[in-house]
């Protein structure tokens, strides 16, 4: 993993993620869960969100590396997830989004 650009990550998040996710503390769940506090949280554990059994049972603790792996191809990383996003194929894009999430979801 390389250091990411959180400014570019914010742009990517806005155009590719924000239609389904929020990041602010106390923000609502949308089609996907609110991501505030994702770093260190276990998969399938955001309060008030209805996850698939696949997400609940994966048992991943989200950190920069697990997010990097997941965001490449969510459906491959967690077979059975309802996340429709096909992923960020470019490592730079994943690093940038993770830098944004690290900054915005703490």
Image (cartoon, rainbow, N blue to C red):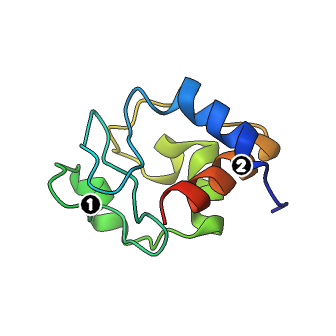
| Left or right of 79, for residue 3 | right
Camera-near label (2 vs 1) is 2
Q: For mark 2, does the 10 Å Cα neighbourhood hold few (<14), some (14 to 19), or many (20 or more) residues?
A: many
Which residue corresponds to the image point at 64% horizontal and 54% vertical from the top-left? 98
Return the x and y of residue 17 as percentages of the image width and height: 49, 33
Relative vertical location of residue 1 with respect to residue 76 in this rendering, above or below: below
Q: For mark 1, does the 10 Å Cα neighbourhood hold few (<14), some (14 to 19), or many (20 or more) residues?
A: some
Label 2 sits on a secondary structure element that is helix
Which residue corresponds to the image point at 37% horizontal and 32% vertical from the top-left? 20
Q: Earlier in the sequence, mark 2 or mark 1?
A: 2
Q: Which residue is mark 2?
A: 6
Return the x and y of residue 65 as percentages of the image width and height: 65, 67
Along the line of sight, the residue nearer the viewer: 80 or 23? 23
Which quarter of the rendered picture does the N terminus lie within?
A: bottom right
Along the line of sight, the residue nearer the viewer: 41 or 59? 41
Return the x and y of residue 8 as percentages of the image width and height: 74, 38
Which residue corresponds to the image point at 79% horizontal and 53% vertical from the top-left? 4
The numbered dot on residue 28 is: none
Residue 32 figure quarter: top left
Return the x and y of residue 43 as percentages of the image width and height: 36, 64
Which residue corresponds to the image point at 63% horizontal and 51% vertical from the top-left? 100
The residue positioned farthest toward the right in the image shown: 2
| Left or right of 74, for residue 56 | left
Q: Which residue is mark 1?
A: 46
| Left or right of 35, for residue 86 | right
């Amino acid at each position: 993993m390389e250091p990411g650009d959180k400014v570019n990550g914010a742009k990517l998040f806005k155009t590719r993620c924000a239609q389904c996710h929020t990041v602010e503390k106390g923000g609502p769940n949308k089609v996907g869960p609110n991501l505030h506090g994702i770093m260190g949280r276990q998969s399938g554990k955001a309060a008030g969100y209805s996850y698939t059994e696949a997400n609940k049972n994966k048992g991943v603790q989200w950190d920069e590396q697990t997010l990097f792996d997941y965001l490449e191809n969510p459906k491959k990383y967690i077979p059975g997830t309802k996340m429709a996003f096909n992923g960020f194929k470019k490592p730079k894009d994943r690093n940038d989004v993770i830098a944004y999430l690290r900054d915005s979801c703490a």
